């Protein structure tokens, strides 16, 4: 049986004349079940292929407009569009299934690509019809819920309104349909072995004109964050981005038109959206190389790496709910992203409560050392202002250490399905040590970085500090820009004189 949540195809092959692996290779976006005994074919199907005729007289219910290539003898001849030859070859069946997919199912390449993409992510993706009935789930659904789709439906029901643990889900979905905006909520489930898992769900409507065609739920398993205080901010950010891209892409999907030219235009628009998604995940130059099939790591001889890490994050996690932690980190890291982009830095990743970015890559930038230090000072100044009202209210304050080092790194893309851009080398390790050896609310830089920026910034020498696995390293605290380069008492905002110097670097 083939099921993509929208259509069903049954291949009945008692003599085992077909190789299941070949079908997987030919149609990687569909799950196959090789039926060698009569499966009780009384369920509704869209397509049935018989390699050998069945002896059972079970009825087969066919939806309207279905195409049948092989059926049991009990069906009327009027349903037959084509009959399989006595000994159909595998290539013949491939052609028949391809015809079914492309013309009967009206599933363009962009649609299938989206399903492949949904099956590649670690979040559960569930597609409902406008009434809330489950149509399709991806592979991650089975891993997170512990149930296959049919087993889940048998136990909990098919409709979202009946099995959702979220209170007031009917009212929330009614608001979603009216506002045409995504709905975010948290819930918990019990797996078959009794384990409790906590989920963060984003439910988005997909419209066909003015009417809702589907509801798409994308769910992240945040149990690790709830139970072991491991932050999943990166997954949350990618979840939101994936939701937006899937929603935008599905808005572009329309009913197959009568003209091939219109189909071609739709596929062209979808390709552009796929390119846009790739460019949002990776640096532009790296995304361009990856599209050409290049994944070779690149050596960058001169970059500056920055690490930022929050003080007492473990204690903060014990005091607050996971949803509040995720919300605050998303708020803070979004500001960090804006500051990094302002100073031409490339965000590399977040690891728990740590934030990592670099200047001078993937595109060369001669002022990367100055840009990185200025970004670090601006982050600390932002946190200082952010914490003022929180201290007055005796709320949790978010203070961080920042460490910076300059040198050589290697950068590249890792992974085959879920791409990640990362950097490696001693420079990365020493930048991390600068952060752990620093002080809260301060910017700690290495001697190498100090030699590059000392003409522009006031720095306090700390002397040699013993660093784990490295030895003694000279370090400096950055106070701010030198007085002649700023009119700001905090030493963070540059004046016109320094901006002119920066443009010449």
Image (spheres, grey):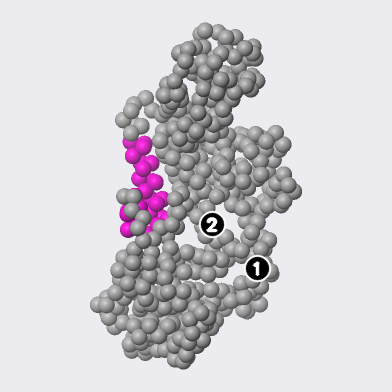
Residue in view at x 48 percent, y 31 percent: 23
x, y (%) of residue 328?
58, 66
The answer to whether residue 173 is left or right of residue 473 is right
Label at residue 235: 2
Above or below, 432 relative to 182: below
x, y (%) of residue 470?
48, 81
Q: Earlier in the sequence, mark 2 or mark 1?
A: 2
Numbered disc 1: secondary structure: helix
Above or below, 39 relative to 213: above
Tell me if label 2 and label 1 are in contact, CB under 8 Å: no
- Quadrant housing residue 126: top right
**Magenta highlight range:** 265-291
Residue in view at x 29 percent, y 83 percent: 497
Which class describes the residues within 10 Å of circle 2: few (<14), some (14-19), or many (20+)?
some
x, y (%) of residue 91?
42, 24
Residue 490 lies in the magenta stretch: no
Residue 285 lies in the magenta stretch: yes
Residue in view at x 66 percent, y 41 percent: 147
Residue in view at x 73 percent, y 47 percent: 193
Label at residue 317: 1
- Quadrant housing residue 503: bottom left
Observer-nearest of 424 and 149: 424
In this view, which residue lies farthest toward the top? 77
Which class describes the residues within 10 Å of circle 1: few (<14), some (14-19), or many (20+)?
some
């Amino acid at each position: 049986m083939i099921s993509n949540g929208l259509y069903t195809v049954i291949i009945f092959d008692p003599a085992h004349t077909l190789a299941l692996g070949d079908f997987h290779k030919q149609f990687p976006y569909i799950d196959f079940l090789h039926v060698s005994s009569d499966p009780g074919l009384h369920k509704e199907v869209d397509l049935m292929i018989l390699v050998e005729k069945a002896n059972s007289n079970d009825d087969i219910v066919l939806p309207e407009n279905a195409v049948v290539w092989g059926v049991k003898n009990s069906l009327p001849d009027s349903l037959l569009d084509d009959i399989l030859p006595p000994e159909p070859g595998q290539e013949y069946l491939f052609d028949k299934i391809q015809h079914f997919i492309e013309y009967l199912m009206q599933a363009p390449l962009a649609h299938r690509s989206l399903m492949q993409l949904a099956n590649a992510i670690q979040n559960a993706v569930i597609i409902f019809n406008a009434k809330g009935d489950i149509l399709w789930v991806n592979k991650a659904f089975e891993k997170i819920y512990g149930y296959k789709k049919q087993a889940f439906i048998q136990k909990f029901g098919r409709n979202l309104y009946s099995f959702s643990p979220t209170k007031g889900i009917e009212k929330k979905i009614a608001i979603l349909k009216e506002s045409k905006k995504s709905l975010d909520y948290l819930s918990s489930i019990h797996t078959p072995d009794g384990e409790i898992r906590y989920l963060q769900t984003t439910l988005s409507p997909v419209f066909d004109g003015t009417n809702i065609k589907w509801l798409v739920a994308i769910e992240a398993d945040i149990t690790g964050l709830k139970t072991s205080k491991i932050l999943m901010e990166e997954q949350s950010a990618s979840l939101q981005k994936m939701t937006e891209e899937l929603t935008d892409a599905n808005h572009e999907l329309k009913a197959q038109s009568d003209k091939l030219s219109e189909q071609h235009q739709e596929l062209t628009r979808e390709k552009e959206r796929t390119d846009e998604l790739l460019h949002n995940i990776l640096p532009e130059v790296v995304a361009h190389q990856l599209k050409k099939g290049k994944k070779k790591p690149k050596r960058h001889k001169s970059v500056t790496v920055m690490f930022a890490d929050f003080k007492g994050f473990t204690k903060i996690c014990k005091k607050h709910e996971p949803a509040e932690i995720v919300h605050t980190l998303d708020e803070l890291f979004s500001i960090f992203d804006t500051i990094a982009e302002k100073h031409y830095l490339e965000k590399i990743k977040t690891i728990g409560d740590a934030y990592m970015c670099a200047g001078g890559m993937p595109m060369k930038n001669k002022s990367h050392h100055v840009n990185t230090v200025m970004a670090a000072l601006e982050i600390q100044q932002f946190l200082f202002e952010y914490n003022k009202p929180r201290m007055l209210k005796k709320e949790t304050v978010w203070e961080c250490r920042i460490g910076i080092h300059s040198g050589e790194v290697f950068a590249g893309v890792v992974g085959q399905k879920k791409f990640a851009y990362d950097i490696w080398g001693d420079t990365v390790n020493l930048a991390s040590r600068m952060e752990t050896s620093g002080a809260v609310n301060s910017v700690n830089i290495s001697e190498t970085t100090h030699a590059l920026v000392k003409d522009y910034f006031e720095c306090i020498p700390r002397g040699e500090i013993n660093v784990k696995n490295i030895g003694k390293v000279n370090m400096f605290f950055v106070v701010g820009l030198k007085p002649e380069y700023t009119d700001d008492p905090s030493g963070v905002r540059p004046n016109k004189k320094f901006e002119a110097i920066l443009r010449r670097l």
